[in-house]
Amino acid sequence: MAEKKLVESITSMETDFAQWYTDVVKKAELIDYTSVKGCMVIKPAGYAIWENIQNQLDAMFKETGVENVYLPLFIPESLLQKEKDHVEGFAPEVAWVTQGGSNELQERLCVRPTSETLFSDFYRNDIHSYRDLPRIYNQWCSVVRWEKETRPFLRSREFLWQEGHTAHATFEEAEERTIQMLNVYARLCEEVLAIPVIKGKKTDKEKFAGAEATYTIEALMHDGKALQSGTSHNFGDGFAKAFGIQYADKDNTLKYVYQTSWGMTTRMIGAIIMVHGDDSGLVLPPVIAPTQVMIIPIQQKKEGVLEKARELQNRLKDHFRVKLDDSDKSPGWKFSEQEMRGIPVRIEIGPKDLEAGKCIVCRRDTREKIEVTLDELESRLEEILKTMQKDMLERARSHRDEHTYTAANMEELEKIFTEKSGFVKAMWCEEQGCEDIIKEKLSVTSRCMPFEQEQIGDTCVCCGKPAKKMVYWGRAY
Amino acid sequence: MAEKKLVESITSMETDFAQWYTDVVKKAELIDYTSVKGCMVIKPAGYAIWENIQNQLDAMFKETGVENVYLPLFIPESLLQKEKDHVEGFAPEVAWVTQGGSNELQERLCVRPTSETLFSDFYRNDIHSYRDLPRIYNQWCSVVRWEKETRPFLRSREFLWQEGHTAHATFEEAEERTIQMLNVYARLCEEVLAIPVIKGKKTDKEKFAGAEATYTIEALMHDGKALQSGTSHNFGDGFAKAFGIQYADKDNTLKYVYQTSWGMTTRMIGAIIMVHGDDSGLVLPPVIAPTQVMIIPIQQKKEGVLEKARELQNRLKDHFRVKLDDSDKSPGWKFSEQEMRGIPVRIEIGPKDLEAGKCIVCRRDTREKIEVTLDELESRLEEILKTMQKDMLERARSHRDEHTYTAANMEELEKIFTEKSGFVKAMWCEEQGCEDIIKEKLSVTSRCMPFEQEQIGDTCVCCGKPAKKMVYWGRAY
C-alpha cells in the first residue's frame, strides 16, 4: 500500500537512532545535502521552524531592551588574536579567506566563527562615556566552524544563530544580563519548544574560550544523550582589557567595561526532532509548528466535501496556521505525510461527517481521534493544541526524569553509563583532575553544575575527597 | 549653542553631496566603519530600517507564494564555473576561502556573491516531476563582492539582501514571475519608501551575467544620479542546461526548467537617505521609520510635564512607534537629534500646552508646526503621518520629473550631461555600438528601456539611424 511507503522509508528509533534522525530530516523535507561537505540547504519546512523560533526569541529579546545590529562576516587575523584564550579556542576550526578578486590578501581574514572580537573592536570606538552604557546588541547571522564530523542541524560547518553581545559598567550588571538571557533561552525551550532544560554553570574545563563564566541550558534527547541548547557567557573585563574598551565614568575616571555574549542556534531544530519525534517522523509543538492544522478531505470527489473543506480552511485561517491537502493522493498517503512532517493535528472530514455536522480531529502526538462538532471547532481546536503543547512538555520532562540517575562512586558511574543512557548526577570536589579522569575513562562530559544544587552525597564521585558541587554528566551531541 | 553643533557637524548637500551623505550615515548613527575595508557595522538605527524593509517585503513575497530557505555561504569553484557568462561576470570580484582549520582545501570555495549556481545545483536534485514545479524560493542573507571603491550601503564588500530563485515549467511562467517580482519591488519603493521608480528592461550590455533578460527599477537621487534599486532576471533555460535541471512532464518526457532570480539590498537605505534627506540629516518616510513619533518635553523639570509626556507615550504606543526623550539634554539639542535621525514627527509639550490641553506636532520634512488638542491627538497624528508619507512621494516624483530631460542627438545629450544632472531620455537604434560610444564618451550608462515607451523622436541619438527604443540614460551609483 502506498500509504505505508513513507513511514517504512525511515528506520525505527530503537533500531538505529542516528539513522532515524537522518531519515527524518530528509523525509520531513527539512534539509538537503549540498556539494560543500558539512553545509546544508535548509528547505522551506525547516526554515519555517527557524523563522518561528526567530520571531519568538526576537520578541523576547526586545522586551528586555535588546537592539539588533549587523557586523561583518570577516575577522582580520590580527583581531582574532587579541584575546589569547579566545584565539586558542577558535583558530583551529575557522575558514580562511586568503584571496580577494585576483589578489592575495595582505592579511588573512577568517569567516566569523563567533563575533566577540568584532564587537569588542566596534565597542572600543563606540563607547566613550557612562551615558553610552549599557550596550545590549544582538545579531542574527550565520557562522562557520570547520568541523570534521558533521550532522544536519547538530554540527555543521555553517549554521544560523543569533549572538548577543553586551557591554556594562559593572561586573554585577554583566552577570545579571548573563543570567537574564539564560532564563530567556530556558523560557523559549519550555514554553515554545516544549523542551525542559537544566540550567547551570559550566565547569572551567567546559567554559567558552575567553569567558570568566559560562552558563548553559542542557536538554536530554530521546536516546538519552545531552544537547547543549543555549549558552550565556560573562567575560568580565577580559576582552575590554585586551581591546582597550574604556569609558569615562561619572567621577571622570576611565574604567573598563564588562561584557557578555549569548547564543542560540539552528541546532534547536535538531533538539525538537530528537525530543519529540517518533517512528512516524517529526512531531512539532503547536506553538512553533509552521502549519498547525492540516485539513484532509475523505472521499473528496463526493459532492460537497471539497467545498466544505475549503470553507473550513477559510473559517480557521484567522485563528490557526492551517492548510488543506486537496491533492489527488489517497487520504492514507496524506495522513502519512502530515505525520512525517509533524503537523500537530489533522482534521478528517468526509461525506458522513458533513451530514452529521462534525469532523474528526486527530492529534499527532497521541494519535487520539476526537470527534468535534463543526460549530465548536475553533474553541475545541484551540483547547486541543494547548493541551498537546502542555502534554509534550510533560512527556519530555518525564522522559528526562526517568533517565536521570545518581552515582556515588566511579563504579556506579561506570555501570550507569555502560548500561544506560541519560543524565547522571554526581558530587564533585571541583578539582579538574577528577573531571579529566571521568571524561577520559567514560567518554562523557560534565554538562553543568545546576543552579538547583542537591546534596546527594558528601564525597567526590571520583577521588572520594569532600565534595563541593553536584554535577550533571552525560554523553553529548 | 549646543543645539547648533549637531547640524553644523554635517556638510551641506549643495557644498558636497558625497560628503553630506557620509556625514549623515555617521551622525544619524546608521553605520560605523570597521577594520575590514569595505565592511561596515550596521548600527541599531540603521538595522531597524532594514528590519522594517524585510518585514514589509517578506510579507509581500509570501502573498505571492514565496517560501524562504537557506543555502550555504560557500560555492565550490567548479560549481561557479558551470555557467560560462555567470562565472565571467562574478569570478573577478569574489573572496576565496583556501584554508579550513589548519588544512589547505583541495578546491577553493568562494564566498557567495549571489547564489544562482547553488540554487541550480540544489534544484537539480530537488526537482523531478511537473508536480514539483514551480519552486518559488527566497533567502535573506549576506553576500560578498570584492569591490575596489566602497561606500556605506551603496557599494560595500559585504551587504545584506534577499535573493529569490525560482524554477518553472515554461518560459512564459518564468517571465511572468520575473515581472511580478519587479512590480513587488516597485510597490515597496513607492508605497513604503516613498521613492518613485522607472520600471524597465536592461540593455543586453547591462543585463545580469547569465540572464536572458534583466528588468530593473531605477530611482533618481537628490543629486541627480541614478540608483538601480532592484533587479529581476529571466534566465530562460540557460542555467537548467548548464546544470542539467530536468523534470518529467505530464507527457512523460524530460524537459528543462526555466529559472528566474530577483534581489533587493541594504542599498535601499542609501536610497532613502539620498532621496529624502536634507541639510539637517535623515528624513524617514513614516511607514518605514523605526520611530515615528518622538515626544520632547519642554521645561521638563516643571511639575506635571514629564508625567504628562509619559502618559502621552503610553497612550500613543499602541498606535504608533513612539519614543520619549526624557534625557537631561536641552530641548533644542533634542530637536536636532530627532531631525538628524529623521524621525517623522516630534511632539513638543510644555507647561503652557498642558494648561491649554494641547501640544505642537512638528513635521520633519516641512518643519510645519501644527497645534493639536490632546483629545484628538491619535487621529490627527495618523492623518499627519499619512499626509507626510504621500507628500514625500510626490516631492520625490516632482524632483525626478524636473530632472528628467530629453535629447535628440549627441550634442544635446552631451550638453545636458555637462550642465545638468538627472535622467536623460533618448531614442536608440538598439545597436550596442552606439551604447558603447555614449558610455565611453559621456561616462554615463543606459539605465533601462522603460516599459512605458514614448516616441520622442525617430532616430538614434548616436548614429541617426532609425530608432527602435527609448532609453533612460544617467550617471549611476
Image: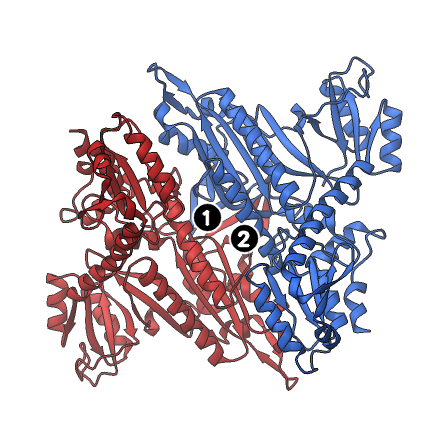
Chain colours: A red, B blue
Q: Quadrant of the C terminus of chain B?
A: top right
Secondary structure beneath label 1: strand
Secondary structure beneath label 2: strand
Total marks in image? 2
Q: Nearer the viewer, residue A54 or A293?
A: A293
Residue B151: x percent and y percent?
69, 49
Residue drawn at x 65%, y 49% is B269
Q: Amino acid at mark 2?
A: Arg
Q: Nearer the viewer, residue A334 or B42?
A: A334
Chain containing mark 1: B
Instruction: Describe residue B465's horizontal placement relative to residue A463 as left or right.
Output: right
Q: Report how far apart the C-alphas of labels 2 and 1 lie in the structure.
A: 10 Å
> Could you say which quadrant of the image residue B351 lies in?
bottom right
Are the residues tagged 2 and 1 within 8 Å (C-beta)?
yes
> Could you say which quadrant of the image residue B145 lies in?
top right
Instruction: Describe residue B323's horizontal placement relative to residue A291 as left or right.
Output: right
Q: Can residue A128 be seen in the rendering of this structure?
A: no
Residue A37: x percent and y percent?
37, 42
Q: Is residue B303 above or below residue A226?
A: below
Q: Is residue B87 above or below residue A289?
A: above
Q: Amino acid at mark 1?
A: Gln
- Name the residue beneath numbered marker 1: B99
Chain containing mark 2: A
Q: Nearer the viewer, residue B45 or A458?
A: B45
Instruction: Describe residue B369's horizontal placement relative to residue B206 as left or right.
Output: right
Q: Can residue B19 be seen in the rendering of this structure?
A: yes
- Name the residue beneath numbered marker 2: A108
Q: Quadrant of the N terminus of chain B?
A: bottom right
Residue A306: x percent and y percent?
30, 30
Q: Residues within 10 Å of mark 2 (few under 14, many from 20)?
A: some
